């Protein structure tokens, strides 16, 4: 079998290698000899003057045009700010290497040109999709959360949970690094991060072996702005936001950049403050033999959050080969919550009132955090061979002061007044070295090493304010130490129209969990393992701007944070949640087939994917002592199959549409969870077909006036032990510039019909529960109207290369083979 696969692979490569001719070349600046990116290269028939093929140069100025029939043609090179070049060429059934083609700057064009463009642009790489969001209007004055809500394939619910293709096991990175973001803190970090500081979003559903295999759904990478224009420039902005409940909030932002031949620096600081109202209703039917009761909970809350987000960095070019840099970001955030919950429990058959009480939950939280990174880069040649070493430190803390006051109306029993203090500290150190050797433009080897140490520590204690006594069940002392050492290699090669990349990553993990009870009894859960994570990518350029890709990766989701933390959450006395330190990692094998078609004004991307996951981690609910218990367990197996369509259409020169449709099927095998009292909880198997759709329309009303409209629909879908009902929302944005584009006003509306709500129905051994968030969520969902003003200053005239880059990004969507 192995021999057959090897022979078939060789035949496959050989077949495509001789299928058609290819034209290669490199576009450079005539004066500086530096490569020019995003240059348009076209093949023109001499007789008809018709364009039959084309390409756009990558970051090294290289272009490849495939599937050109033999004959005589004109090669046309155009780039805004430069004089066009026309070159006669003759194509035979072999590779035509044109070498370097210099372009001369056109000073007259530079003085007259004005770039008009807007909207979320997208481009494709062999292992990622890139969405440029720096012109995203609907998220102006908002946060990274709002930016992600406008990206195809990505969903963010009212609780701040991020999912990719309906899977929450996704890693969220900043500038290519995890940056200390975890499931416990990333909702707060993303809500605090200003939208204006983000340049683009990279979606990697099947990352290569070069990247961490964490997150079975893939990686969402937030690329922060760090322009490289010569001189200095910056901006200052301020805005107001009116949230549901007529709560007024505000934001302000300041950024500055400076660069010359030796130094590139940037700094940014943003302040946000918001307050929102929310309410929800929960109805739970409890079956206790013949005695059936119904518990209804009505909750109203006011949630506030705010704080400071800051980031800065400097790159110093020591010489032509060596560059060092230091960068970091930090935040000082505060959150508050004041919630009133009315509980009513009746006996279903007689409607007798068994219990009626009111509970007031208040919480104040601080979440300071930071991430620091230092790097050294050595460039070995001009085609991209380099060695990059990174050392990073990060720390994210959460400090909670909770108070629970319960007033019992029926029956006549004593009230409760309990305080609970909790802290979560997450500190991480990472050393990473990446070596890239480019033998030529079509042949690349990557090697790397990554060592990571992370400590998560959680402590909590509870006090009965009426009796002044400690509550042992509220006590928690949890420590999770984790070491991961990884080594990887990838090798990529391009032969005519065919591109291939293979990789292998090995990871050795050591995990040490320690839980200490109220009476100082400690339980240890040590674990170590070694796993291999292969990856493979195949791509082939078909005639007439068609591209097809096939890839495979193996990934892992290691349980962390609240999934394994023994901390018991008593904020709702009728439902206690806690982690499971005995969880093991889940592993997924993922296959994906991609097709890309480019027309002059349209682009279509179609992806079919299949993912097989073992030891699936899911939440499980069950009744114990008339209280609903919620924890996590490893299920058996899960299969996910889906198709995703992303279309980009430019209509009537003033309208850009970015549309996505995701069709999704999943199947989970049945499982059994054994409780601490040795009671079996049967988890039924589930099958689910669902879909979601999103459309982003960008409209140019004039040279200085533009708009954006975003609509999203999520169909009903199966969740753990139940289902989630449909959800839909509409966002809009308007932007007007004044004074030669130095002053900008943006009006935004998010969830303008107030429909982004969560409604679920779950059931298990002894209960059925229905939940609906009528308004808002933990991270403050619901309607928000905002007005933001921004003033730009400094050297705002970009270099010709930058201006050309912007123009091309607004008129083309290209396939990138290089990272």
Image (spheres, helix red, strand yellow):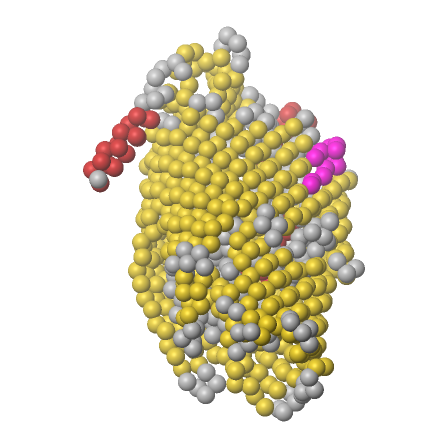
**Residue nearer the viewer, 253 or 644:** 644
The single residue placed furthest to the top in the displayed view is: 47
* Residue 530: image location, x then y, percent: 30, 60
Residue beneath the point at 72% across and 39% down: 707
Q: Is residue 708 magenta?
A: yes
- The magenta span reads 699-709
Q: Residue 239: in sight, yes or no?
A: no
Q: Residue 631: in sight, yes or no?
A: yes
Residue beneath the point at 46% across and 83% down: 517
* Residue 623: image location, x then y, percent: 52, 72
Q: Is residue 588 magenta?
A: no
Question: In the rendered view, would you say 557 is above or below 1?
Answer: below
* Residue 260: image location, x then y, percent: 56, 45
Question: In the rendered view, would you say 342 is above or below 381?
Answer: below
Residue beneath the point at 43% across and 11% down: 72
Number of residue marks = 0
* Residue 504: image location, x then y, percent: 32, 48
**Residue nearer the viewer, 517 or 434:** 517
Question: In the rendered view, would you say 397 is above or below 810?
Answer: below
**Residue nearer the viewer, 35 or 609:** 609
Residue beneath the point at 42% across and 67% down: 673
């Amino acid at each position: 079998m192995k021999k057959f696969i090897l022979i078939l692979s060789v035949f496959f490569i050989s077949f495509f290698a001789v299928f058609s001719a290819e034209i290669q070349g490199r576009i450079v600046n005539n004066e500086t000899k530096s490569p020019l990116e995003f240059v348009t290269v076209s093949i023109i028939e001499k007789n008809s003057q018709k364009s039959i093929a084309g390409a756009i140069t990558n970051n090294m100025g290289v272009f490849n045009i495939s599937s050109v029939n033999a004959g005589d043609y004109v090669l046309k090179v155009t780039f805004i700010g430069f004089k066009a070049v026309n070159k006669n060429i003759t194509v035979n059934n072999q590779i035509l290497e044109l070498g370097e083609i210099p372009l001369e700057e056109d000073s007259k064009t530079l003085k007259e040109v004005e770039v008009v463009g807007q909207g979320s642009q997208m481009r494709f790489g062999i292992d990622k999709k890139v969405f440029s969001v720096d012109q995203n209007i609907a998220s102006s004055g908002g946060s990274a959360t709002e930016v992600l809500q406008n990206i195809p394939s990505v969903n963010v619910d009212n609780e701040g949970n991020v999912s990719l293709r309906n899977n929450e096991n996704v890693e969220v990175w900043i500038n290519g690094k995890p940056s200390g973001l975890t499931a416990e803190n990333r909702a707060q970090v993303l809500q605090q991060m200003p939208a204006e500081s983000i340049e683009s979003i990279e979606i990697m559903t099947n990352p290569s072996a070069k990247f961490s295999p964490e997150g079975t759904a893939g990686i969402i990478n937030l690329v922060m702005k760090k322009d490289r224009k010569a001189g200095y420039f910056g901006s200052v902005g301020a805005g107001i936001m009116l949230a549901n409940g007529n709560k007024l909030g505000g934001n302000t932002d300041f950024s500055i950049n400076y660069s010359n031949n030796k130094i590139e620096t940037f700094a940014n600081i943003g302040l946000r403050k918001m307050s929102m109202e929310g309410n929800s209703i929960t109805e739970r039917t409890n079956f206790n033999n013949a005695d059936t009761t119904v518990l209804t909970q009505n909750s109203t809350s006011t949630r506030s959050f705010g704080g400071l987000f800051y980031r800065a960095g400097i790159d110093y070019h020591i010489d032509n080969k060596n560059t060092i840099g230091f960068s970091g970001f930090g935040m000082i955030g505060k959150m508050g919550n004041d919630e009133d919950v009315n509980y009513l429990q009746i006996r279903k058959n007689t409607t007798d009132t068994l219990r009626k009480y009111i509970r007031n939950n208040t919480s104040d939280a601080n979440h300071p955090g930071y991430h620091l990174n230092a790097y050294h880069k050595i460039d070995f040649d001009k085609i991209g061979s380099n060695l990059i070493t990174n050392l990073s430190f990060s720390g994210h803390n959460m400090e909670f002061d909770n108070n629970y006051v319960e007033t019992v109306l029926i029956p006549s029993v004593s009230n409760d007044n309990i305080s609970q203090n909790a802290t979560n500290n997450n500190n991480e150190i990472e050393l990473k070295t990446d070596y890239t050797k480019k033998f030529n433009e079509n042949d690349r080897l990557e090697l790397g090493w990554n060592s990571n140490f992370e400590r998560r520590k959680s402590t909590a204690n509870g006090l009965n304010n009426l009796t002044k006594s400690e509550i042992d069940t509220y006590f928690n002392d949890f420590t999770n130490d984790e070491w991961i050492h990884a080594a990887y290699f990838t090798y990529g090669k391009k032969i005519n129209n065919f591109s291939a990349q293979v990789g292998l990553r090995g990871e050795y993990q050591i995990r040490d969990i320690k839980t200490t009870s109220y009476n100082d009894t400690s339980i240890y859960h040590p674990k170590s393992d070694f796993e291999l994570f292969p990856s493979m990518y195949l791509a082939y350029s078909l005639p007439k701007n068609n591209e097809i890709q096939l890839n495979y990766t193996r990934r892992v989701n290691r349980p962390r944070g609240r999934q394994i933390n023994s901390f018991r959450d008593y904020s709702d006395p009728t439902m206690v949640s806690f982690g499971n330190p005995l969880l093991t990692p889940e592993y997924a094998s993922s296959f994906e087939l991609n097709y890309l078609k480019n027309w002059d004004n349209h682009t279509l991307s179609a992806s079919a994917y299949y993912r097989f996951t073992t030891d699936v981690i899911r939440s499980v609910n069950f009744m114990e002592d008339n209280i609903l218990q919620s924890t996590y367990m490893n299920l058996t197996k899960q299969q996910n199959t889906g198709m995703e369509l992303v279309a980009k259409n430019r209509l009537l020169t003033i309208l850009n549409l970015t549309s996505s449709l995701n069709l999704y099927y999943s199947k989970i095998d049945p499982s059994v969870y054994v409780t601490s009292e040795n009671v079996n909880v049967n988890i039924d198997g589930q099958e689910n077909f669902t879909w979601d759709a999103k459309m982003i329309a960008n409209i140019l009303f004039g040279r200085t006036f533009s708009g954006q409209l975003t609509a999203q629909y999520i169909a009903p879908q199966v969740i753990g032990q139940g289902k989630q009902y449909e959800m839909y929302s509409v966002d809009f944005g308007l932007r007007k510039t004044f004074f030669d584009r130095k002053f900008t006003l943006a009006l935004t509306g998010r969830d303008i019909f107030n429909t982004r709500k969560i409604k679920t129905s779950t059931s298990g051994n002894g209960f059925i529960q229905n939940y609906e968030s009528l308004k808002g969520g933990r991270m403050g969902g619901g309607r928000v109207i905002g007005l933001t003003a921004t003033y730009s200053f400094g050297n705002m005239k970009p270099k010709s290369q930058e201006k050309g880059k912007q123009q091309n990004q607004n008129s083309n969507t290209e396939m990138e083979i290089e990272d």
